[in-house]
Structures are given as structure tokens and as C-alpha cells.
Image: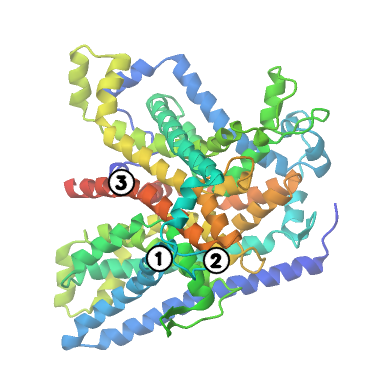
């Protein structure tokens, strides 16, 4: 083990102290300015008081939203109609490129595959687990452990799973769990998982399912507990039982929650580029829309094409988020 | 979604109702329990493998699988020291600067939106004016805008200022190499959701209390500081935890606005780079990855109740 020179470690700690000092200094400055403004504006009385209060309370948030979201939204749409250096107007050419180029076809196909497989798998598994786990002893232990991946970043999760999929030449001992498991099961020469198209797409989706299943389970478990007692009781007196009770009573009663969970996971799936970027970088036929948008915009600097892909992504998530927001609002209204 | 779950701690061991039990009973079989146990083990093993590998000596990691720790328990902590301070394998200087960056980015990017959103939510709920409902709805509706829609223009703004025709609207500031663009971007993107959630809470505060304070001659600023903020502590805590984890775990915003330099880039950016270029050196990568996930995991196991609430409320975030 090489021994670190104490000097190097010292400079690392100094560097850390300076950076954290800057960061906490910024917070102190921010709060300090606010306090001064509050104090000054609080002195104002009479007719000036109310408008001043509105300006001070709302102004900063509105300004940031305008500069950070509203203006960029309009500008991205504008840029998507222009050439990659934004100098010429191209009409719908960038969109035409997105829907006719072969490589982008693969990207859109993969994205669609992700959008269907990962959310359905995560929600379905979450529903089964929610039904099974609540009558078990130590249930909170199981729930915590299945829910835990939700706290891990997608980058962290990708590294965890990249290690599981790691493949060595068959002359060496395997260090990836999947290859070793295949060997234990009698498959002597497992393939290089990450390179096997189209299997690698599904292996990447496993990471998303691993992260999102716990979320689906926790939300659905709460919804099942909230079903009124009388409903299930009445159905039971009518002779329904077992799987029929589940399929014709439980599932319809939690339908709204089920759809919200499904759309929520879909939104995360559509926008998640972390997994593809960390595990394959979009190579080996695994590219998806969100990562292609990043590559076009910030690696190849094709601003027009990148913007068009962003707009396509926006249009794809719009109905999903819209549905969720309407549901959320309905729920608030009935409460 | 949040209201269904916020009333009951989602991970508690509340007893199921009798009729719900009937449905569960039909699923109840040793096979069902076995299924849950198998899934739990499958869900835990990959993370355990990461931890085990990060604690094994380099020579062993390269030639044998981590499951050999059970037969040859030979655990060390030196991987963590070397990955933090030495780096090695072409990694200059180790991961310590990136870990510090993560912290230096996350704390302000949590405090700023929290304070600004609670101010905006208070004004929209209690300093009512013409159009305040419309304004609230507009802010709320901005949640549909995905991050990707804002990245290119915002990056152009940070690097070149904003111009309308020949007129400079926002001058160019040289912010490269500082945390400021990342803080600002995270604050901007967090505001719609934060304002929405805090407005729900702040607008529910008792009207009598607010009116009594006004009668006593308190200004809006005094009411905000001495009544609203203290009473909102639980809602603020939930959102703070959600935002902390969101920023800590984020890759897209950091990659776009911080770049990859040790001066500003956080752990997620560095790990994504290392995963591409140094994928073979698992003892480095696993130790680094475990360092980056240990803080979210502590938050998760320590503040599970708040964590669940914040996460459920924030799951529609763009």
C-alpha cells in the first residue's frame, strides 16, 4: 500500500475547508441580505407596505422562474427550428432528421421499449410485493431493504450493476455475480452481457426496476390499506375470494394510484439518462432519447438537433405529467 | 399521492384491516413469503457486493469474486484512504475534492430554493392580490417543463449573457469554475415543486392566528419570520430532505453546469467518468461509489419517515 504523504492529505483538507467556507459563506450572505431587506422593507408603512411586501416575497422566485424556466422553454423551441449553430432557419428539418435517421430510429425504439417494460415491471412487481409483504413478520425490514435503492443515485446504482454484469475471459475466474451465477448453473461460457444486443437493453432496465420497485410497493401498500373495509367485506359475502377478489375488487379500488405510480415511473424512465451514460455511454445499441439529447447538445454541439430532441422529450412527458398533476389537484380538492 | 401516504408512516407496521386481510390471505402461502424473502435478498445482494469489494485488498479483487469474503475474510479499509487521497491509475489526486464539491453544491442548493419558495408561497397564500391565484397556477404548471428543455439556453446565458436584438439584457458574468451556475440551476428547477408543496402547507395555517398578528400590528415580514417559518418546520424538513437527496444524486445538472474539473464537479460526475475509463479497477470504483451512496443511505435509514414523505411528494418533479 503506498503511504500518502501527510503534505498531500493536508492540502486536500485545506482545499476542503476553503470550498466549504465559500459554500457556507454564500448561505450566510444570502440570509444576511434577506434579513437586511426584511428589516428595511418592514419599516415601510401605509400604502407602500403591501406592494413592497409582495415585491420582496415574490420577486426573487418569479425572476428566477422567468430566467430559468420560462425564457429557456421558449428559446429551446425557437432553437429547434434553426441550424446547429443557430444561424439559419430550417423549419422542421431537425424534426425530420430525428424521425428519419437510422441511428435515431434505434434510439426512439429503445426509448419506447424502456417506457413500456421498465414501468410495467416495476409497478407489477411492486403491487405483488405490497400484497404479500404486509402479513409477514419483520415486514418493515423487508420493505426497507427493497425500498433502499431509491436513496442511491442512478450513477451509484449503475456502478453497482455494472459490477454484477462484469465479464472476464473464460480462462480467468469471474468476478461479476451474473457470470458466476451462470457458471454455477452450468452455463460454462457466459457471454459478455453488456455487449450482447438486444439483451443489454433489458439488463440496463433491470437497474431502473431495481430502483423503482420499492417506490411502487410503498405507495401501493398505502393505497391498499386505505380501501374501505365494507367494500371487501361485501364482496367476500357475495362469494368472491382469492384471486377474483384481488382482480375484481382490490385492483379497481386502487386503480387511480396504480396509474399514478405507472406514469410517475414512466416520467423518471423517459428522463433518466444517468443509467445509460454510466453503464454503456450509449454504445452497443443501448442509446436512449435523454442521453442522445445530451450528446447532441453538449458533446457534438449540434444545438438545433439537441433542441429538437428536447422538444420531442417534452411532448412525450407532457401528457404523463399533466395526468399526474390533474390527479394531484383532484385529491387536494376532495380532502 | 402524497396525501394518501402522509397520514400514515408508509413503512410502519400498522395492522391491516380484517377485510383487507381476506385478500391478503388468498395470497398467503409459504410460497408467497418465500417470494418476498427471495426478492429482498436479490435486492440487497448487489449493494452488499459493492461494500464487500470495497473492503477487499486490491490483489484479491482482481482475481476472485467478492463472495469469497465468506471463506477468506480479509477486510481492509485502505481502499478508502487511497481512493480519497491518492487516486492512482491515472486518477489525479483522489476523490476527496469531488466529495467536498458534492457537499458544497448540495447544501446551498437546498437552502436557497427552500427559503425563496416559502417566501413566494406565503405571499401567494396570505398577501393576496389580484391575479395571485392565476400566478400560483402558472408556477404550479411549470412542473411539466423537463430539465432538458432549459439546459441549452441556460448554459448559453451563463457563458454569454442575454441579448435581445442589439440590447444586452443580462450582462456576461464570468462564473466558470465556481459553484454559482450549479446553485442557480438547481434553485430554478426546484422552485415550482417547492412553491406548490409549501403553499399547500402554508395556506392551511389557522386564519385566526394570522389575523390576530395583523391586529397586533405585525408586518408581513414579522409574521413570516415568527409565525409562518416555525409552524412550517415539518413541511420544510420534508422538502429539505427531498431536495438534498435530489441534488446529491443528480448527474444531469452537475454535468452540464459544473463540467468535470476537480474544482467544481461533484461525486456523481466523477464516478460516471471513472466508470467509463477505469472500469477494470473495481476496488477504486466500488470504494468511490460506496462513499457517494453512504450519505443518502444514512439519511434514508435515519429519517425514513420524512424521507418517504418528501420522496412521494416530489416524485412528479421535472
Residue picked out by circle 3: A324
Q: Position of residue B117 (x, y in %)?
A: 34, 66
Single out the mark in the foreground, 1 or 3.
Answer: 1
When the figure is inspected, residue B43 is found, relative to residue B36, above or below; the finding is below
Residue picked out by circle 1: A78
Q: At x 27% / y 48%, what residue is drawn?
A: A328
Give the mark, 1 or 3, whose residue is nearer the N terminus.
Answer: 1
Residue B257 is labelled as 2
Q: At x 29% / y 45%, what residue is drawn?
A: A323
Q: Nearer the viewer, residue B24 or A182?
A: A182
When the figure is inspected, residue A142 is found, relative to residue B309, above or below; the finding is above
Chain for disc number 3: A
Q: Residues within 10 Å of mark 1 (few under 14, many from 20)?
A: some
- Badges 2 and 1: C-beta atoms under 8 Å apart? no
When the figure is inspected, residue B300 is found, relative to residue A187, above or below; the finding is below
Q: At x 52% / y 64%, what residue is drawn?
A: A84
Residue located farthest toward the top when viewing the structure as drawn: A239
Could you say which quadrant of the image residue A33 lies in?
A: bottom left
For the residue labelled by badge 1, is the local secondary structure a helix, a strand or a loop? helix
For the residue labelled by badge 3, is the local secondary structure a helix, a strand or a loop? helix
Single out the mark in the foreground, 2 or 1.
Answer: 1
Q: Is residue A217 left or right of residue A150?
A: left
Q: Can residue B302 be spotted in the picture?
A: no
Q: Nearer the viewer, residue B288 or A325?
A: A325
Q: Is residue B94 left or right of residue A35?
A: right
Amino acid at each position: 500500500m503506498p503511504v500518502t504523504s501527510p503534505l498531500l492529505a493536508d492540502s486536500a483538507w485545506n482545499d476542503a475547508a476553503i470550498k466549504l467556507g465559500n459554500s457556507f459563506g454564500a448561505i450566510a450572505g444570502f440570509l444576511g441580505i434577506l434579513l437586511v431587506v426584511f428589516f428595511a422593507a418592514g419599516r415601510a408603512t401605509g400604502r407602500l407596505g403591501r406592494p413592497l411586501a409582495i415585491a420582496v416575497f415574490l420577486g426573487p422566485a418569479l425572476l428566477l422562474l422567468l430566467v430559468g424556466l420560462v425564457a429557456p422553454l421558449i428559446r429551446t423551441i425557437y432553437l429547434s427550428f434553426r441550424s446547429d449553430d443557430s444561424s439559419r432557419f430550417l423549419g422542421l428539418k431537425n424534426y425530420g432528421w430525428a424521425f428519419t435517421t437510422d441511428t435515431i430510429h434505434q434510439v426512439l425504439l429503445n426509448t419506447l421499449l424502456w417506457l413500456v417494460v421498465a414501468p410495467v415491471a416495476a409497478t407489477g412487481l411492486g403491487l405483488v410485493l405490497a400484497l404479500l409483504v404486509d402479513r409477514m413478520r419483520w415486514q418493515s425490514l423487508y420493505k426497507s431493504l427493497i425500498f433502499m435503492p431509491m436513496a442511491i443515485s442512478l450513477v451509484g446504482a449503475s456502478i453497482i450493476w455494472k459490477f454484477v454484469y462484469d465479464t472476464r475471459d473464460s480462462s480467468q475466474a469471474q468476478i461479476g455475480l451474473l457470470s458466476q451465477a451462470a457458471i454455477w448453473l452450468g452455463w460454462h461460457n457466459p457471454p459478455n452481457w453488456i455487449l450482447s444486443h438486444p439483451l443489454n437493453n433489458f439488463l440496463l432496465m433491470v437497474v431502473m426496476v431495481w430502483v423503482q420497485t420499492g417506490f411502487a410497493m410503498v405507495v401501493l401498500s398505502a393505497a391498499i390499506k386505505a380501501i374501505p373495509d365494507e367494500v371487501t367485506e361485501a364482496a367476500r359475502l357475495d362469494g368472491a375470494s382469492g384471486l377474483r377478489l384481488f382482480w375484481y375488487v382490490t385492483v379497481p379500488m386502487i386503480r387511480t394510484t396504480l396509474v399514478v405510480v405507472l406514469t410517475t415511473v414512466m416520467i423518471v424512465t423517459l428522463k433518466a439518462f444517468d443509467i445509460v451514460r454510466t453503464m454503456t455511454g450509449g454504445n452497443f445499441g443501448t442509446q436512449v432519447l435523454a442521453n442522445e439529447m445530451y450528446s447532441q447538445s453538449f458533446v457534438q454541439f449540434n444545438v438545433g438537433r439537441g433542441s429538437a430532441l428536447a422538444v420531442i422529450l417534452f411532448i412525450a412527458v407532457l401528457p404523463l405529467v399533466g395526468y399526474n398533476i390533474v390527479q394531484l389537484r383532484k385529491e387536494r380538492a376532495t380532502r | 399521492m402524497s396525501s394518501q401516504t402522509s397520514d400514515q408512516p408508509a413503512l410502519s407496521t400498522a395492522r391491516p384491516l380484517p377485510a383487507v386481510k381476506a385478500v391478503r390471505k388468498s395470497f398467503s402461502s409459504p410460497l408467497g413469503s418465500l417470494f418476498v424473502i427471495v426478492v429482498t435478498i436479490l435486492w440487497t445482494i448487489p449493494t452488499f457486493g459493492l461494500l464487500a469489494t470495497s473492503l477487499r485488498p486490491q490483489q484479491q479483487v482482481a482475481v476472485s469474486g467478492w463472495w469469497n469474503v465468506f471463506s477468506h475474510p480479509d477486510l481492509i479499509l485502505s481502499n478508502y484512504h487511497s481512493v480519497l487521497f491518492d487516486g492512482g491509475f491515472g486518477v489525479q489526486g483522489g476523490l476527496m475534492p469531488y466529495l467536498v464539491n458534492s457537499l458544497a453544491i448540495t447544501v446551498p442548493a437546498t437552502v436557497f430554493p427552500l427559503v425563496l419558495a416559502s417566501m413566494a408561497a406565503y405571499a401567494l397564500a396570505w398577501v393576496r392580490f389580484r391575479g395571485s391565484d392565476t400566478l400560483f397556477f402558472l408556477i404550479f404548471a411549470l412542473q411539466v417543463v423537463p430539465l432538458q428543455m432549459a439546459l441549452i439556453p441556460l448554459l448559453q446565458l451563463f457563458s454569454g449573457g442575454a441579448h435581445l436584438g442589439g440590447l444586452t439584457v443580462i450582462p456576461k458574468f464570468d462564473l466558470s469554475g465556481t459553484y454559482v451556475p450549479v446553485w442557480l440551476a438547481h434553485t430554478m428547477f426546484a422552485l415550482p415543486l417547492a412553491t406548490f408543496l409549501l403553499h399547500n402547507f402554508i395556506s392551511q395555517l389557522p386564519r385566526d392566528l394570522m389575523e390576530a398578528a395583523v391586529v397586533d400590528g405585525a408586518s408581513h415580514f414579522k409574521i413570516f419570520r415568527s409565525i409562518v417559518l416555525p409552524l412550517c418546520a415539518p413541511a420544510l424538513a420534508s422538502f429539505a430532505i427531498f431536495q438534498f437527496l435530489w441534488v446529491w444524486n443528480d448527474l444531469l445538472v452537475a454535468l452540464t453546469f459544473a463540467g468535470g474539473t476537480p474544482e467544481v464537479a461533484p461525486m456523481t460526475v466523477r464516478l460516471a467518468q471513472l466508470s467509463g475509463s477505469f472500469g477494470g479497477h473495481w476496488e477504486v470504483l466500488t470504494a468511490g461509489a460506496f462513499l457517494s451512496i453512504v450519505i443518502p443511505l444514512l439519511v434514508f435509514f435515519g429519517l425514513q419517515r420524512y424521507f418517504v414523505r418528501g420522496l412521494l411528494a416530489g416524485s412528479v418533479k421535472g
